[in-house]
Every structure is written in structure tokens, then in C-alpha cells.
Amino acid sequence: MFCARSSLFTLARPAAATFRIAQATSVRALATQAAAAPKRGDLTPAQAAFLARTGFNFSAKLLKQATTHKTYKDGKVPHSEQLQYFGEQVLDLYVTEYLHAKYPNLPPATLRDAVAAYTSTATLSMLGKSIGVQDVMRWEPQEVSSKDSEARMQAKITKALIGALYKAQGAVAAKKFIHAALLTKDMDLTPLLPLDEPKRALSALLKRQGRERPVSRMLHETGRHSSAPVFVVGAFSGLDKIGEGAGSSIKMAEHRAAKDALLKYYLHTRVNPPLPSDTEAMPHAERNAYVGAPLGDTPAIL
């Protein structure tokens, strides 16, 4: 990515988290078709090809507005600023609800950083390029053009297109696009977790849960008196082994065992969890009977 906080490949707090953006070939089926086709007169060949490639069911007027930045012709033609803002809110909603449902035990700060990574400038720029935004966006650089400024513009136009998709084809179409283009790709959330003092954090977590305090137990060791010893330690709460770690010293192995226990807890994953927005596509009777997934645990306060 292009900034420390929102980088897809170099995430803030503190290291890398990676995943690949869905390719344009997977995007064709992401937008549902409207009952009546909109008027599409006055499209350039590039704009017509863009609609055909993505499957977006936009009118010519809406497509032009969504792909026009306010710098184009000094803002004297309809531009994408409102659609961009709208798209940002739609993105945040669907990305947040999905990550919160999938990882119910994530600390709030980690959830916030994960959402920021999935919706960052670099991520959305890559998505925009994969569907050909660069071929249809209209803007006028206010400074010497660079790859960074072009990437920022691609991200803005991509947000505007998501806003336009929501307005033109509805919430279900926008959600399908976001899930297929962004959320089908996993991200390594480990660098975003608070793991600097794992033994202390694990003790606080178990205490708050009313469980027995963590105890380290040696599981295996080799070469204690050699130049390359290896110690394998388990982290236990009562009789339950909740983590395991190895290291060249007992202290290192204990540290890693506590960290492993925290990772297993924080990264607990629900498979295909129900989402509140699922009700948007449900018949009335099913909508009334919908029961959401239970809330996850609350992080321990150290």
C-alpha cells in the first residue's frame, strides 16, 4: 500500500498483512441485473466496455458521474464526491459486519485496523485497476502526476462506483461485489494483535473469564547442556493445554506458548456466520425469524 496506516501489504501496527485482490474475471457476476435496462446512450467505447466487463447495470449518466472527480473541468460537470462518500459508508458497513462476525474475539483496535486495511487506498486502487477504472476515470491532476496520486484517484473512483452500485442496484448487489472482490481473500491479522506482553495478557484474559491462571509446563527438551538446546513448553489453564511454544531457552518457549494461546483465542473463526445484512435478501417471514450470531468476548483490561 501507499501509506503506513492503510497499506494492504505493509499494515500499520506494526508489520505486514497480505492478501490478493480478486481479479477482474471474478467480478462479472457480482452485480445483479435490474428489471429494466437503463439508458446507455452517449457512452465512449471505453465506458461501454467497462460496463460490459463489470456487469454494472448503470445508466450513462450515473457511470459518468461516478467516474468523474471534482477536479475535472473545475467541478463544472456532475462529479463523484457524494457517491464516493456514500461508497465509503457502504464499504465500512459490510466489511465491519463481516470481520466482526467471522472473528468474534478480535480486540476493537484490531478490528478497526483490519477494516482500515481492507478499505485502504492501496487495496481499493488495486481493485479499481483489476476492473479497469483507469480506463474510464476523468480527473485533472492538481500537481505533478505520480503513481501515488493516480492510485489515490483510482481508490476514490472505486468507492464512488460502489456507492453508485448501491444506489442503482441496491444493497444486495453492493454487498455481493464487496464480498467477492475483497472479503474472499484472507488477511494475516497476527501483526495487528496486542501481543507485546503475551504472558501478562493471557493471565488477565483468563482471570476475567474466571478460569485458572496460566501455568507453564515443560513438554519436551533436547540438548539442555549443549550449544543448541530446544525447549517445548505448554501453556495450561487447569488441565487444559491452551498453547504451545518452542525456543532456545525456557523463557522464550514460555513467551511463545502464551502468544500461541492468545492467537488461538483472538483468531477464533466462525465459518459462514449469519450477518445482519443477510436479512435484506430474505422473505418477510424468514427476516422476522432471523437470529444473529452471539457477540464475541470482551478483551481483558490490563
Image (cartoon, grey):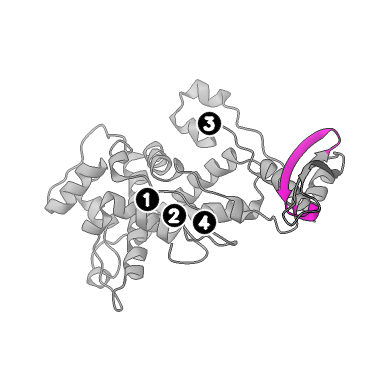
User: Nearer the N terminus, badge 4 or badge 1?
Assistant: 4
Q: How many marks?
A: 4
Q: In the displayed structure, does residue 186 sit left or right of residue 135?
A: right
Disc 2 on helix, strand or loop? helix
Q: Amino acid at mark 2?
A: Glu
Q: In the displayed structure, does residue 224 sit left or right of residue 106?
A: right
Q: Amino acid at mark 1?
A: Gly
Q: Nearer the viewer, residue 46 or 254?
A: 254
Q: Quadrant of the C terminus?
A: bottom right
The answer to whether residue 298 is seen in the rendering is no
The magenta segment is 237-252
Q: Which residue is mark 1?
A: 163
Q: Which residue is mark 3?
A: 272
Residue 291 place in picture, x, y as percent? 60, 28
Pair 4/1: label in front: 4
Q: Which residue is mark 4?
A: 116
Whether the residues at callouts 3 and 4 have beta carbons within 8 Å, the answer is no
Residue 107 place in picture, x, y as percent? 67, 50
C-alpha gap between disc 3 and disc 2: 24 Å
Residue 34 higher or lower than 142, as above or below: above
Residue 41 higher or lower than 170, as above or below: below
Q: Which mark is residue 214?
A: none
User: Nearer the N terminus, badge 3 or badge 2?
Assistant: 2
